[in-house]
Image (tube, grey):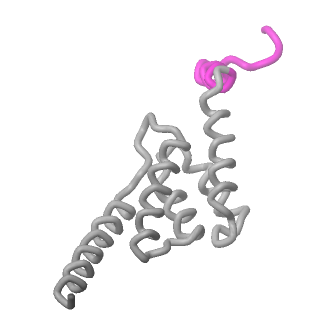
Amino acid sequence: MKQKYQGNTRVKRAQLQALRKEFEILHMKAGKTVNDFFARTLTIANRLKANGENKGDAGVVEKNLRSMTPKFNYVVCSIEESKDTSTITIDELQSSLLVHEKCMSSPVADEQALKIAHGEQSGGRG
């Protein structure tokens, strides 16, 4: 019985090590959505919790903030400056990032970016 328990402890420790590594190296990949990234992060966090290690909301929020793609840098900076990241919930963060993702991917935003890039002004004709 003692050997069986020690074997299970070693296996659990090895699983936790693998999950910790997976959690730490996790980054949002270009072309993936906020929802995809949060699903991956929460899956790993839940597996860690099931094995006895709880990252908590604050740990998951901080991980997500530092692991977003560069196009979210200004959004992450804004969130970090305007909110207490230790008290923001995962759902609040995800909602905020989804709003920004939608704004970044809207055709109107793309059209405005093209106009600015080509030196055109919106509004009047000239």
Count every numbered label the image shows and give the total: 0
Q: Residue at x 68, y 65 (%)?
A: 88
Query: Which residue is outermost to the right?
Result: 124
Q: Position of residue 13 (x, y in %)?
A: 28, 77
Query: Which residue is outermost to the bottom?
Result: 2
Residue 117 in magenta? yes
Q: Is residue 6 above or below residue 65?
A: below
Q: Residue at x 60, y 54 (%)?
A: 76
Q: Residue at x 29, y 72 (%)?
A: 17
Query: Which residue is outermost to the top?
Result: 126
Q: Residue at x 65, y 26 (%)?
A: 106
Of 86 and 7, nearer the camera is 7
* Image quarter (top left, top right, bottom left or bottom right) of the C terminus: top right
Of 41 and 46, nearer the camera is 46
Q: Quadrant of residue 14?
A: bottom left
Q: Position of residue 32 (x, y in %)?
A: 46, 38
Q: Is residue 30 above or below residue 78?
A: above
Q: Position of residue 18 (x, y in %)?
A: 28, 66
Q: Is residue 101 above or below residue 62?
A: above
Residue 105 in magenta? no
Query: Which residue is outermost to the left?
Result: 3
Span colored in magenta:
108-126
Q: Position of residue 47 (x, y in %)?
A: 42, 63
Answer with left or right where residue 90 lies relative to residue 5: right
Answer with left or right where residue 38 lies relative to residue 99: left
* Image quarter (top left, top right, bottom left or bottom right) of the N terminus: bottom left
